[in-house]
Image (cartoon, rainbow, N blue to C red):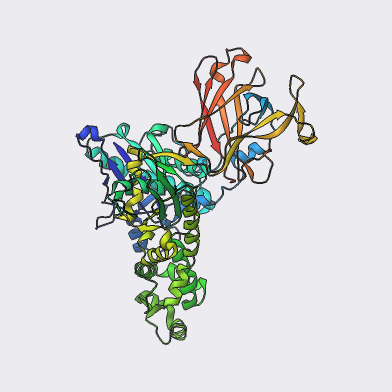
């Protein structure tokens, strides 16, 4: 069985697939979980929300949490309601973090590389400090002895509200994923499947860094999901949506005398525009001769989801009508149910907003808010809204300005992806497609803006049930990935000490190795170039050896760059993104010269992966890669 988890800013869901060999049918169709605590109407998504008491006690989650938060009696020690915490991973963790400590320690000469990825022979690479125990957010959120055991209570050492934003988000994500994990097991066990029978897939935004993906994976493992790489995979959200769209029956009308086709047809080119609550992500693809997807551009996106429009509604409309932000905050605290009702009226109204609308929106002011406003508040409303005091009036101009907080940025991102798609297209190719998916894609204003903006450059299609496209696709991706090759977002390489070139390399970077050979420190040995097309099965290879006989590990610094050919890891655009640590403790009986390892790096999957094999024995040794957050 496979289980897809679409973890979203506003809502999250579960999709399950039983292997077709088990049921004897060819069609693969996910089954969505639609029953959630506190929700009387079936829905494929539960709210991404938690009600937490004290340090770690989850009182309610999803719709249940919202209902309890709205009906509980006000008190200083009352459980706290958290929502939107996925976007907290966009914050950097609070120092000191693990790799901050590492950077403070100057490395010694450590590993020799017999084959440089930059085509320079006989180079050596400095080892850094060994990886220290995790003392950051993971420690605060708690560690589990057995990641495959469900129901272990999450331990949080301090009150969630006192944590910095990033650490709080990590703890909340873990708590929420724990509830999703338990709900999925309930459903699987009804079908006769246990935890060991399940392969899991968790979705992540395309714009997330490798560090953010790693944190998400760590949160999932602490929540109970299996730690094994093959049993827990991550899927990029628009890529997951593409998997769904390709199997959903979307028809591609023929052009230039060609017959109609579908999204699996060889040569079909399309851009996936995934518009969610927190982020907007775009990826572009062209099907190869076998119908598998090949990225034609680098994934792009930004924090331009529908929650930004809601934030603007609060900051521009409500603050203007009620006087100042402190008044709005007070109303939300004193009248939470009424305030939520007002915001949900706007949520429904914005989906119906169109570019040709001529009449304003009228949002009824709940009685509790009306009483709290008093005479002075009503007087201000009358002045601001031509005498109307029982409703919030949002003019067409104001509504358009709210959408303008994100729509222009989305259209710019579309232009970038279309350019990449057009550049890779053979002469005479049909126009590419733009697939609108995600909850925000239901906005008629956004649909119209996209269609008008692209004009004749592309055709805009909306697959069935676009709000659940990523959810369906998560399960389909775990079942059978359709992607063959991806584009590298950045240039990647490792830090080495290469042969010193007189007149080129600065003297301040020189040093002599143990053989008396002059070397240049901090050289960037390129592995992958930005924009390079990489097969999902392709591995880059390098050879490393420990420099000292007593070394029980080799540590290799991994760097990224926004440039194509950096020479030094200190060049503009270069950043250390992580450390690869290879454990040699099991091969210490070998002679020093026989402990060299073949390091294999894979950049074509959702996450960068590393493995190491001892050259003498062919044994694969423990290899870990930990990413920093500073990129």
Res 265 quadrant in image: top left
Residue 563 at x, y percent in the picture: 62, 44
Residue 347 located left or right of residue 325: left
Q: Quadrant of the N terminus?
A: top left
Res 96 quadrant in image: top right
Residue 159 in sight in this render: no
Q: Quick check: 228 above or below 486?
A: above
Q: How many marks?
A: 0
- Residue drawn 30% across the image and 49% down it: 261
Residue 311 at x, y percent in the picture: 47, 65
Residue 107 at x, y percent in the picture: 69, 31
Residue 169 located left or right of residue 197: right
Q: Quick check: 161 above or below 555?
A: below
- Residue reaching furthest left? 24
Residue 134 located left or right of residue 79: right
In this view of the protein, which residue sits in the foreground, 180 or 203? 203
Residue 117 located left or right of residue 604: right
In this view of the protein, which residue sits in the foreground, 551 or 114? 114
Residue 325 in sight in this render: yes
Residue 239 at x, y percent in the picture: 40, 46
């Amino acid at each position: 069985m496979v289980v897809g988890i679409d973890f979203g800013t506003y809502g999250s869901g579960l999709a399950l697939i039983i292997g077709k060999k088990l049921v004897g049918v060819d069609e693969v169709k996910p089954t969505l979980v639609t029953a959630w605590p506190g929700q009387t109407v079936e829905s494929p998504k539960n709210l991404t929300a938690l009600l937490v008491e004290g340090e770690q006690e989850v009182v309610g989650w999803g719709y249940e949490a919202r209902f309890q938060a709205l009906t509980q009696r006000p008190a200083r020690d009352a459980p706290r309601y958290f929502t939107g915490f996925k976007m907290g991973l966009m914050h950097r963790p609070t120092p000191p973090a693990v790799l901050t400590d590492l950077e403070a320690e100057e490395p010694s000469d450590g590993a020799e590389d017999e084959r440089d990825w930059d085509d320079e022979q006989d180079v050596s690479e400095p080892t850094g400090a060994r990886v220290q125990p995790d003392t950051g957010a993971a420690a605060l959120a708690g560690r589990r002895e057995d990641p495959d055991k469900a129901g272990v209570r999450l331990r949080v050492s301090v009150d969630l509200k006192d944590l910095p934003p990033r650490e709080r988000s990590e703890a909340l994500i873990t708590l929420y994923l724990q509830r999703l994990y338990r709900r999925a097991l309930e459903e699987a066990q009804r079908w006769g499947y246990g935890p060991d029978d399940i392969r899991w897939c968790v979705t992540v935004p395309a714009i997330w860094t490798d560090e953010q993906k790693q944190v998400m994976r760590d949160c999932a493992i602490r929540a109970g999901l299996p730690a094994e790489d093959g049993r827990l995979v991550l899927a990029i959200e628009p890529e997951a949506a593409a998997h769904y769209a390709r199997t959903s029956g979307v028809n591609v009308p023929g052009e230039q005398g060609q017959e109609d086709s579908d999204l699996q047809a060889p040569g079909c080119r399309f851009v996936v525009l995934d518009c969610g609550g927190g982020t907007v992500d775009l990826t572009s693809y062209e099907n190869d001769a076998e119908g598998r997807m090949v990225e034609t551009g680098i994934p792009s996106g930004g924090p331009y989801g529908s929650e930004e429009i809601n934030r603007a509604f609060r900051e521009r409309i409500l603050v203007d009508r009620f006087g100042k932000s402190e008044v709005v905050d007070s109303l939300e605290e004193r009248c939470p149910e009424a305030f939520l009702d007002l915001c949900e009226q706007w949520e429904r109204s914005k989906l119906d907003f169109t570019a040709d609308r001529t009449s304003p929106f009228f949002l009824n002011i709940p009685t509790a808010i009306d009483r709290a406003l008093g005479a002075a508040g009503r007087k201000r409303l009358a002045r601001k809204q031509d005498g109307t005091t029982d409703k919030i009036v949002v003019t067409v101009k104001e509504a358009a300005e709210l959408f303008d907080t994100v729509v222009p940025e989305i259209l710019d991102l579309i232009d970038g992806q279309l350019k990449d798609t057009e550049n890779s297209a053979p002469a005479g190719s049909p126009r590419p497609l733009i697939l609108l998916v995600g909850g925000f894609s239901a906005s008629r204003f956004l649909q119209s803006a996209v269609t008008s903006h692209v004009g004749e450059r592309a055709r805009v299609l909306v697959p069935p049930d676009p709000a659940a496209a990523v959810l369906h696709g998560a399960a389909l991706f775990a079942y059978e990935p359709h992607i063959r090759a991806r584009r590298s977002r950045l240039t990647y390489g490792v830090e080495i000490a290469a042969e010193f070139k007189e007149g080129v390399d600065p003297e301040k970077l020189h040093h002599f190795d143990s053989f008396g050979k002059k070397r240049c420190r901090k050289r960037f040995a390129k592995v992958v170039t930005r924009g390079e097309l990489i097969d999902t099965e392709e591995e880059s290879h390098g050879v490393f050896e420990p420099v000292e006989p007593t070394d029980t590990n080799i540590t290799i610094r991994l760097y990224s760059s926004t440039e194509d050919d950096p020479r030094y890891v200190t060049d503009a655009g270069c950043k250390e993104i992580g450390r690869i640590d290879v454990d040699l403790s099991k091969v210490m009986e070998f002679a020093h010269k026989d402990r060299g390892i073949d390091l294999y790096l894979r950049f074509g999957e959702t996450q960068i992966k590393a493995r190491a094999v001892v050259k003498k024995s062919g044994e694969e040794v423990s290899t870990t890669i930990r990413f920093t957050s500073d990129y």
